């Protein structure tokens, strides 16, 4: 549910808002499935936090659309934007429903868990500890995809989320990295982030 009193209007381009909503809703689906598979409350809580952010973006997009409509013709042209935004919002709501299963301790049926486990790629989150060798490194220079088969698909930095971070994004202490890749690579990125692995193999 959107807490309207806490939302500050921002004049953002509608295209940027749609792209951000799309990217976040896609990430939420991955997080929700992984939360269900590994019964991870942390991942489930991330999903619910992102759902609130999508709700906020949808509200701001609606305000921008109304301000942009100067006449009936403009309003008609913006209907498609509203439909796409509503669809992205529904996707985020569905992901939140999956996450709620984990947080409410309802449990996942073995058949569902077995279906999730057939996915070759895994997703995990890892917090960057003070002694991690990743601190101060740019993602592009680390070449994680080439070396260990892992992509960093999001970074949580405090309350801020960086979705699909670029290669010039630097890893900070206490960042929470959301990584996707093969199981062995996922374990290695966790070790690198937590400081238990001190070398990234070439």
Image (cartoon, rainbow, N blue to C red):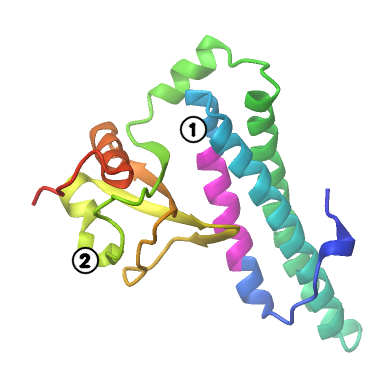
What is the spatial separation of the Cα atoms under label 1 and label 2, in whole angstroms?
A: 27 Å
Ranked by sequence position, the earlier of labels 1 and 2 is 1
Asked whether 183 falls inside the magenta stretch, the response is no
Residue 12 horizontal side relative to residue 187, left or right: right
Toward the viewer: 162 or 190?
190
Callout 2: few (<14), some (14-19), or many (20+) C-alpha neighbours within 10 Å? few
Q: Which residue is mark 1?
A: 34
Toward the viewer: 126 or 30?
126
Image x and y of residue 173, in percent: 39, 57
Secondary structure under tag 1 reads helix
Q: Is residue 72 above or below residue 44?
A: below
Image x and y of residue 3, in percent: 85, 55
- Main SS class of the magenta portion in the image: helix
Q: Residue at x 69, y 30 (%)?
A: 100
Q: Which residues are magenta?
A: 19-31
What is the number of callouts on the image?
A: 2
Tell which residue pokes out farthest to the left in this image: 202
Q: Residue at x 58, y 67 (%)?
A: 19
Q: Which residue is mark 2?
A: 141
Q: Which mark is residue 76?
A: none
Secondary structure under tag 2 reads helix
Q: Are marks 1 and 2 in contact (CB under 8 Å)?
A: no
Is residue 173 visible to us here? yes
Q: Residue at x 27, y 44 (%)?
A: 195
Toward the viewer: 192 or 37?
192
């Amino acid at each position: 549910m959107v807490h309207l009193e806490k939302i500050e209007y921002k004049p953002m381009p509608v295209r940027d808002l749609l792209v951000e909503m799309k990217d976040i809703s896609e990430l939420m689906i991955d997080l929700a499935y992984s939360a269900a598979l590994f019964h991870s409350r942390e991942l489930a809580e991330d999903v619910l936090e992102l759902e609130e952010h999508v709700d906020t973006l949808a509200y701001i997009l609606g305000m921008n659309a109304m301000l942009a409509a100067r006449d009936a013709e403009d309003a008609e042209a913006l209907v498609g934007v509203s439909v796409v935004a509503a669809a992205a919002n529904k996707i985020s709501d569905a992901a939140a429903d999956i996450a709620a299963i984990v947080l409410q301790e309802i449990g996942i049926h073995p058949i569902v868990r077995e279906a999730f486990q057939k996915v070759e790629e895994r997703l995990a989150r890892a917090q960057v500890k003070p002694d991690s060798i990743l601190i101060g490194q740019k993602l592009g220079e680390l070449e994680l995809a080439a070396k260990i088969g892992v992509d960093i698909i999001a970074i949580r930095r405090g309350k801020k989320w960086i979705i699909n971070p670029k290669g010039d994004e630097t890893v900070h202490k206490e960042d929470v990295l959301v990584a996707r890749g093969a199981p062995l690579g996922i374990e290695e990125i966790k070790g690198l982030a937590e400081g238990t692995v001190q070398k990234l193999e070439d």
